[in-house]
Image (cartoon, rainbow, N blue to C red):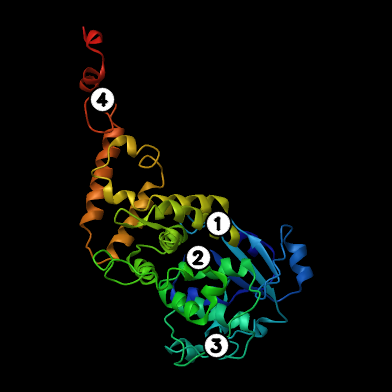
Amino acid sequence: MDNLLAASGLPLYEASFTALDAYRGLRGAPIRFLVADCSLVDLARAFGDLRYPGLPYADAALEGEAEDEESGPRTTYLRCVDGPAAAEAAAFAPLDLLRDGKRDVFLDPKGVYPNLRETLATMRQAPPEDQLFQAAALLARQPYELPAGTLLPLPRNFPLAAQRDLLALILTGPKPAAAFDLLLRSGFVGEYWPELASLSGLGQSKDHHPEGDAWTHTMETFRYRKLPSLRLSLALLLHDTGKPAAASVEGRRFDRHAEIGRSVASRFLARLGFASSLVDDVSFLVRYHMMPAALPRLPLNRLEGVIDDPRFPLLLEVYKCDDLSTFRGPDGYYEACAAYRTWAKNSRNPYRRADGKKLARAWLEEAPRGARR
């Protein structure tokens, strides 16, 4: 994608969160924002596969290949302006920063450098759909806070594509909980993401979840990520969304909530337009997020199709974040990892079964008496 953009010869500048991320050294965003000092006609001539998303922050878009396995494909949004100094009218001053990627220099046409060193984000007038979107993404991705008492209006008819972009920006940032709490207080979560809103106030056993309700628990899981990958973060966000609809059965407060959560997660992600492969991966992680806890004690016939799935190592990461958020410590995670390493070692050994027994001995134990002679 970078080569394609450079070959176009058009004056393109990184803008908004892309420029800020570059300034802070933050990587991994699945979305990139550029401003183009040209017309939309010029863009259409330069890029044959240009699409027009109809979003308030983009005139056009290009789909690129995956940067890496974790970040996945990246969408490049372009906005046409009359010159680099006329970049998008950002609601928050830090988003006025630009970067010239060819020269690797930052541009400050609106004098926002002093704001970059502040902890409070300076806000300007902007449409409601811009304000909450930018505020939430800014809180998740950058070391800013909102001024005390800041009230942001709830946008109406917020496009599904914009919801998907906002969720991706939040989850691939280092501080997603701050953004989600803002969205919850503003009423956005209740209006647009009711699957998540139902976690707020959902009580849990203090013996197993001393950290608080299901929403607090979910927010706590993000603290234990090694990397803010989108797949892992979506799984953490959605792993307990089956609890509100789960019944209490024989002492189990949220019976079958993982199975229910798989359906909830699949519908939620599909509604927002995430790629089907990502939906499948996250649904798998939600469905089996409790299995690693029992891994050292489960028989092999209960593990087939799960432990040998290439996504199982990521499932262990989901379990780690889930378990550590309850303040239980890492012992359960270490035991699960040890059991998985043992299984992986035995499964690659042509002389042993996956449970570690030698094949000849296993045959003798299972063969009929007459076949042993």
Residue 112 x/y as whole percent: 53, 89
Mark 3 or 2 closer to N-term? 3
Mark toward the viewer: 3 or 2? 2
Residue 60 visible, this angle: yes
Q: Nearer the viewer, residue 312 or 191?
A: 191
Q: How many marks?
A: 4
285 relative position to 76: left or right: left
Mark 4 or 2 closer to N-term? 2
Q: Secondary structure at mark 4?
A: loop
Residue 178 x/y as whole percent: 42, 77
Mark 1 or 3 closer to N-term? 3
Question: Label 1 belongs to which residue?
Answer: 267
Picture residue at 23% right of the left edge, 65% below the top: 207
Residue 172 visible, this angle: no
Residue 311 x/y as whole percent: 41, 47
Residue type, numbered disc 3: Ala
Question: Label 2 belongs to which residue?
Answer: 195
Q: Nearer the viewer, residue 199 or 93?
A: 199
Looking at the image, residue 223 lies above or below residue 74: below
Residue 162 x/y as whole percent: 61, 70
Question: Label 3 belongs to which residue?
Answer: 93
Label disc, if present, on residue 351 of the rendered structure: 4
Q: Secondary structure at mark 1?
A: helix
